[in-house]
Amino acid sequence: MTQNLTEEQIKKRRKENLLDDATKELNEWTGDDTAVEIHLFQMFSEVFKRHNKDEGDALFIVGTKTTTPSLSEVSSAPVKPWLFSRVLALLGLSFALLTLLFLVFHSDKAVPGMVFIGSLAVPFSLAIMFFEINVYKNISVFQATEVFLIGGIASLIATMVLYQLIPSGNGVDLVSALTIGFIEETGKLLIIGYFINSFRVNYIFNGMLIGACVGAGFAVFETSGYTGEFGLVTLFVRSWQAIGTHTIWSAIIGAAIILAKGRHKPVKGKTMVRPKFLRFYVLAVLLHAGWDWQAPTPFLSAFDIQKWLIIIVGWIAIFVLIDAGLREVRTLQGQRIIN
């Protein structure tokens, strides 16, 4: 019994060391050299608590001249988003009712609603989560919606243009998967950079939010298109998989742009060749490529292990960038006090 317990402790220690090494490496890309502690239950602790309507309203009434806090008022405490879970529950219930309408009453009129809500639920809820995480509260709901809709469609257009210029193959082999990852992440990158310049934002959390909104819009319209082409089975698969795809990949790229562009400077071509950007951009491309690639190893294909590993790596990067965002708040507030 003692020997078994010791083996379990050794395995746990190895997992912790592996996670610490991963977060430390990613954190070095942001300019720090320490491991990042990930506390899932702490971050999402507010999800399981009761919140009234006024609390929800307060989260949405931000981004105006009167509701954007000064730098000294910005909180550097660990972020604890919760409203996104209510949005997800609302959309999930709507999808369930539409599915019931389709299955029980055989109403084909429910199908367009199923496609729309099913494609929207997870990406849009994640975008709301990043909206909550933006502690600067300097981007309004209208602006975020603009990025979600126009940015999502524009990034698809940019991607289609790149597909015309670059042969991509079928996405099954590794080269094709890498090409597709490069094309789609670059298409979204162009639109993310445009909105960062347009809104003149300078904070990591701002970049994450804009990136997440572009990626979420991209994911919604892409899933809707694939569902129309391949049927409702595609919708049921892609809807849950959206927790670890375009929305978080684009959030990573948005944060990387802010890290690389410099304070109060626009995004330029030289921004894209700086290591702080390139490392995270390449990570996003590799995550995308790994998602599309059909690995020859049956073990990885079984139970979607390959996709779960990609989801985990993507979220580890997000947690590291959240930590970097909070560190940025503390740094800026410290500089303000000194000045």
Image (cartoon, rainbow, N blue to C red):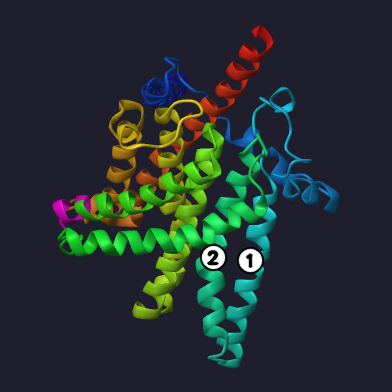
Residue 150's place in the image compared with 31, above or below, is below
The reply to whether discs 1 and 2 touch (Cβ–Cβ < 8 Å) is yes
- Pick the front one: 198 or 115: 198
| Badge 1 amino acid | Leu
Q: Secondary structure at mark 1?
A: helix
Which residue is found at the position 30% from the left and 32% from the top?
270
What span is in magenta? Answer: 173-178
Q: Quadrant of residue 257?
A: top left
**214 sits left or right of 205 in the view:** left
Number of disc labels: 2
Q: Earlier in the sequence, mark 1 or mark 2?
A: 1
Q: Is residue 175 magenta?
A: yes
Q: Is residue 133 magenta?
A: no
Q: Position of residue 86 (x, y in %)?
A: 70, 56
Q: Residues within 10 Å of mark 2 (few under 14, many from 20)?
A: many
| Badge 2 amino acid | Leu
Is residue 246 at all visible to an observer of this figure? yes
**247 sits left or right of 29 in the view:** right
- Distance Cα–Cα, label 1 vs label 2: 8 Å
Residue that mark 1 sits on: 91
Which residue is found at the position 28% from the left and 32% from the top?
273
Q: Position of residue 24 (x, y in %)?
A: 40, 21
Which residue is found at the position 74% from the left and 33% from the top?
69
Q: Position of residue 145 (x, y in %)?
A: 59, 58
Residue that mark 2 sits on: 120
